Image (tube, grey):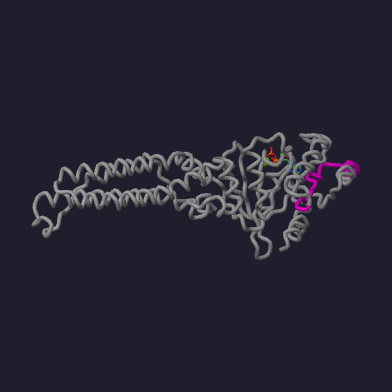
Amino acid sequence: MSGESCLPQELRTRVPTYEDVRRRVLETFPKSVVVPRGIRRQGRERARVFKYLVKSERVFQVIAAEVGRVARLPKTDSMHPFYAELVRAALGDEYDAVIERARRCVKIVSRLWREYRAKILSCYTGSEAKRVATEFVGRALSAVRRSLRGAERIVEALRELRKLPCIDPSAPTVIVAGMPQVGKSTLVSALSSAKPEVAPYPFTTKTIIAGHIDMGSVRVQIIDTPGILDRPLEEMNPIERRAVAALRSLNAVTLFLMDPSPDSYYSFDRQVRTLESVASLVGRDRVVVVFNKVDKVSSDRIEECRRIVESRGFSIEAEVSALYGYNLEKLVQILRSRLGI
Ligand SMILES: Nc1nc2c(ncn2[C@@H]2O[C@H](COP(=O)(O)OP(=O)(O)OP(=O)(O)O)[C@@H](O)[C@H]2O)c(=O)[nH]1
Ligand SMILES: [Mg+2]
């Protein structure tokens, strides 16, 4: 399970910056050209004109190939919303704008090349051809510079996205939410068939943890998102809101874990408020509320907490102990039916 292999193929491509393209052009232009005998026979000047024609053509091909890499990136409207939101979290509209400019640039440089090819072919001397070829390279590179403004940020953003754990946006998913210390990581580990993968959540200082639960023949992703779904929307920064939007676009149920212990890290009241906020973010019907740590909570206290949650219109669907594995099979059955598997 490696993040690298899970990002869609078209987002795994190397994206060049203007400096990369310029370097490749400056390497390409001086490379020697073999002039065929037939042209050599037409005289020294003709042979030099031919040389500059070939050099310019090579430059054109390098630029078309490199800028083409950017032009062929998928725009956000043709990506899965999960990735689209993550890309927008980092770059806003700039990502699509760079791609659009790169697409235009390929056309501009192709047009320039047609124009300059004819100009070079009509040169009589090698030095004239050299001047025209140099002018072509200059104009083509300045078109590239204008179009690839902002490409550095795309390179950065794609590098970030590659760190994302293996998440298949179309696979059934359980997102584990809940306030700090309620036992989310313990639960994800207990339910996962393999050791969960821990990786940075792109563009945030948070971590995302992904594991799998095999439900019959279906492999369900289980994702722990510490720091993302644990407080009200208005307390989140714009990037975190995008992170939530990305999660919302998954085919997922949200397991909201609560700690009813009297000594819970956050008071039960705050947990209820967070539940309400998370439910409004992901949709009430997609939330499964679960009490954890019931191994250390009296039944009176559980009843008291249950009544509080029910008074807000939610029901407790399972009481588990992630640490001791109590009721986890039942929890999996509940998740399974909620996911329709
Ligand atoms: N008694 C008991 N302790 C538990 C249970 N589940 C988790 N814990 C303990 O609660 C503490 C927090 O557990 P974590 O799994 O790290 O909680 P978390 O929700 O991932 O916390 P953050 O990552 O900080 O948001 C740890 O000391 C766990 O051992 C449980 O079912 N029973
Ligand atoms: Mg944790």
Q: Residue 293 in the image: x percent, y percent?
A: 78, 44
Q: Residue 290 in the image: x percent, y percent?
A: 79, 48
Write the residue at 78% across / 50% down. 284
User: Is residue 166 toward the left or the right of residue 215 in the image?
Assistant: left
Above or below 240: residue 211: below
Count up the numbered dots.
0
Q: Residue 120 in the image: x percent, y percent?
A: 22, 49
Write the residue at 18% across / 52% down. 50
Q: Nearer the viewer, residue 335 or 190?
A: 335
Q: Nearer the viewer, residue 168 or 306?
A: 168
Q: Is residue 297 magenta?
A: yes
State the residue lying farthest toward the bottom: 217
Q: Nearer the viewer, residue 49 or 254?
A: 49
User: Is residue 238 toward the left or the right of residue 148 in the image?
Assistant: right
Span shown in magenta: 285-305
User: Is residue 124 toward the left or the right of residue 147 in the image?
Assistant: left
Write the residue at 62% across / 38% down. 239
Q: Residue 222 in the image: x percent, y percent?
A: 66, 52
Write the residue at 51% across / 44% down. 95
Q: Is residue 183 magenta?
A: no
Quadrant where the C terminus lies?
bottom right
Q: Nearer the viewer, residue 24 or 203?
A: 24
User: Is residue 259 toward the left or the right of residue 210 in the image?
Assistant: right
Q: Where does ligand 1 appear, by image quarter? A: top right
